[in-house]
Image (cartoon, coloured by chain):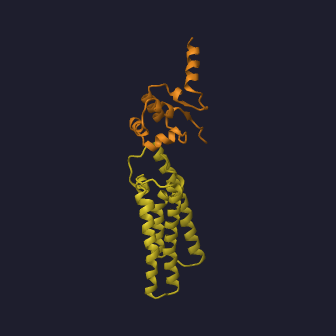
């Protein structure tokens, strides 16, 4: 990883990242349901900014994104950690998607919105790196 | 199946040879953090990596790794010598 972060810092930044993601999606749905004026959608900029900021710090600068997506120079321990993170992430993601489908069916709202789908896409891409950061303590 | 913990003497052997973690890591082809994990016995190496470590130190694999906590090296050498006699 490029920049070593303490596990507690990584966990806090991950919490900030996913809370801001849920805020973006939740706020959008809330405003959509309330048929609010388009100006109220400007409030979305705040959690979006927080989401981008925390993404850059926790996924990009830490190198976790590269480790899970592109890095071909991993050794056997790192490969084992990435595989474990992928297993965990896809387990969580499957349950989450089934839960979203179930809730959508129960409240009879039909297919999910564009923002909801974008949120799920973001989760699918970041969950493996998040699982890695959550579990692994970067020690020398 | 739960893996058994492997004990090792990598830290001792590395310090004896005055190697930094980075230097050892380059010799055995892993990230330097992995050497730290191995020394703290928080990661069990594959057989291939164990052989590379053994080759790097020029010692038999059973002298470096064990499934039981290892006695001091001097004690072990005495035992080996007595066995030979």
Quadrant occupied by the C terminus of chain B: top right
Q: Chain A in the picture: what colour?
A: yellow
Residue under the image location 50 percent in, 63 percent down: A13
Q: Quick check: can you spot residue A90?
A: no
Residue under the image location 40 percent in, 58 percent down: A61
Which chain does orange denote in the image?
B
A4 and A52: which one is in front?
A4
Image coordinates of residue A54 in percent, x first then y, are 45, 65
Q: Compared to A104, does A6 lie above or below?
A: above
Which quarter of the picture shows residue A69?
A: bottom left
Q: Is residue A32 left or right of residue A106?
A: left
Q: Compared to A39, does B25 lie above or below?
A: above
Q: Is residue A99 left or right of residue B23?
A: right
Quadrant occupied by the N terminus of chain B: top right
Residue under the image location 47 percent in, 62 percent down: A124
Q: Compared to A35, does A94 lie above or below?
A: above
Image coordinates of residue B45 in percent, x first then y, are 50, 38
The image shows a total of numbered marks equal to 0
Image coordinates of residue A16 in percent, x first then y, are 51, 67
Q: Quick check: can you spot residue B27?
A: yes
Q: Compared to A94, does A29 lie above or below?
A: below
Image coordinates of residue B56 in percent, x first then y, are 42, 30
């Amino acid at each position: 990883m490029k920049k070593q972060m303490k596990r507690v810092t990584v966990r806090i930044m991950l919490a900030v990242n996913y809370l801001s993601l849920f805020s973006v999606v939740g706020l959008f749905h809330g405003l959509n349901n309330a048929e609010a004026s388009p100006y109220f959608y400007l409030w979305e900029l705040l959690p979006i900014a927080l989401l981008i900021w925390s993404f850059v710090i926790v996924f990009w600068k830490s190198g976790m994104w590269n480790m899970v997506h592109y890095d071909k120079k991993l050794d056997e321990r790192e490969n084992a950690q990435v595989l474990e993170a992928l297993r965990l992430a896809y387990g969580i993601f499957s349950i989450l998607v089934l839960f979203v489908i179930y809730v959508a069916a129960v409240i009879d709202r039909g297919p999910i919105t564009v923002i909801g789908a974008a949120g799920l896409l973001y989760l699918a891409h970041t969950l493996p790196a998040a699982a890695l950061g959550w579990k692994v303590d970067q020690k020398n | 199946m739960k893996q058994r913990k492997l004990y090792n003497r990598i830290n001792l052997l590395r310090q004896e040879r005055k190697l930094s973690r980075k230097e050892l890591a380059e010799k055995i082809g892993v990230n330097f953090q992995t050497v730290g994990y191995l020394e703290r016995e928080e990661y069990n190496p594959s057989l291939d990596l164990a052989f590379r470590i053994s080759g790097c130190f020029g010692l038999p694999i059973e002298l470096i790794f064990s499934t039981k906590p290892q006695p001091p090296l001097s004690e072990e050498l005495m035992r080996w010598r007595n066995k030979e006699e």
